[in-house]
Amino acid sequence: MKANLITAFFLVLLGHTLHCGVVLEDVFKPEMLLVGDKYIYVAEGWQIKIFNRLDGKRFGAFGRRGEGPGEFNGYIIPSLTDRGIFVSCPARVLYFDREGTFLRERRALKVFGRYKPMGKNFVGYRYLREESIHYETVCLYNGDFQLVRELYRRKHIRQPDGSTDLVNERPPFFHVSQGKIYLDGIDGYIHVFSHGGEPLGRIPGTENRVPFTSRHRHEMEEALKRDKRTRDYYYANKDKFVWPKYQPMIRMFYLADGRFYILTSREKQGKMEMLIRSLKGDLLGRKYVAVTSFPQALLSDVREGRLYRLAENVDGDWELRITNLMNPPAEVE
């Protein structure tokens, strides 16, 4: 499987820290990291590799390219559920247990992109065009993948005229937990919906609006020009890039341990601010972490107050690095 081109733009911006972690065996081009109670899951190509969470030793792997049971026919997006692993890929969703044993699948021609189960229903993306504007939306679907209602929309990074906003490089992100849907908005809030898609309110994420400066633009353009994966695209499309006044208010958010972990655009010494909030929105703490883009956030996850992330070291190996977010307590201003 080839990585999404837009995602590749931001892989060139991944930084390296000096401290070392546990090298994961046979990981070469990871695309997503999930951390469960016992195992760590790394999605790479048409396969999901499983590692022991305690020592990083490889437990096994599952999945391969194909149309048969337990096989993947395109870009895969896994997520953890209470019972196992749920994987969405083009025209199908598949269910596995926590050890990677295939259980069952559902086929649906409309399925493409990130989907998650919500009881008998599903939450997922839909792309649409209205009045010459492209949107990415989060929607609730019934068990037959028929649209129930749209929950949220934001402009797609690439519009019909070719203009492209590389700063806001992702669609709205969402989590499903305990019968509720949580998704992040461009307004800096986390929006909450019931299992039926009814809006229940919004929770403060961040009030910070961080300007996108000429320095940020220069650093991004130089990184695109240096990297051979993006150099040709940059020179062919640089006149179509649009640069916003502000960086994303929420770059990514995690939902774990009954808390929100919200990555913002505030910087300190090359690290990004992570706000830790209760499910009611109370600020519990603040940390600065080495996660600086959405693709890098996809290679990170939170479990039991710890940030797990994959980082490539100077030898080209992928290390699992762990940051304790809650002990000692995170600073609160």
Image (cartoon, rainbow, N blue to C red):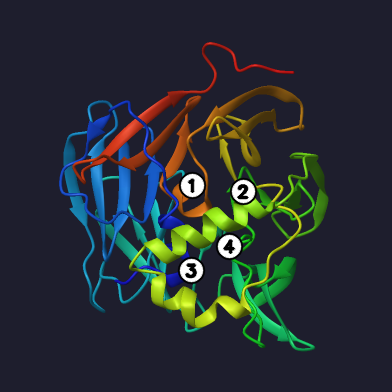
Q: Which mark is residue 251?
A: 2
Q: Which mark is residue 139?
A: none
In the image: residue 42, left or right of residue 59: right
Q: CA distance from mark 4 to mark 2?
A: 9 Å
309 and 50: which one is in front? 309
State whether residue 13 is above or below residue 286: below
Given this view, does label 1 or label 4 mark the residue nearer the observer? Answer: 4
Residue identifier under label 1: 297
Q: Residue at x 70, y 18 (%)?
A: 332
In the image: residue 148, left or right of residue 125: right
Residue 35 in sight: yes
Q: CA distance from mark 3 to mark 1?
A: 15 Å
State whether residue 70 is above or below residue 177: below
State whether residue 232 is above or below residue 16: below
Residue 30's image quarter? bottom left
Residue 38's image quarter? top left
Dot 4 lies on which element? loop
Q: Amino acid at mark 3?
A: Ile
The percent coordinates of residue 22 (x first, y second) are 24, 31
Whether label 2 touches label 1, CB < 8 Å: yes
The percent coordinates of residue 18 (x first, y second) are 33, 28
Q: Amino acid at mark 2?
A: Arg
Whether label 4 touches label 2, CB < 8 Å: no
Q: Earlier in the sequence, mark 3 or mark 2?
A: 3
Q: Earlier in the sequence, mark 3 or mark 4?
A: 3
Dot 3 lies on which element? helix
Count residues near mark 3 (Cα–Cα under 10 Å), then give few for <14, some for 14-19, many for 20+: some
Q: Amino acid at mark 1?
A: Ala
Residue identifier under label 3: 6
State whether residue 33 is above or below residue 289: below
The percent coordinates of residue 117 (x first, y second) are 53, 59
Residue identifier under label 4: 169
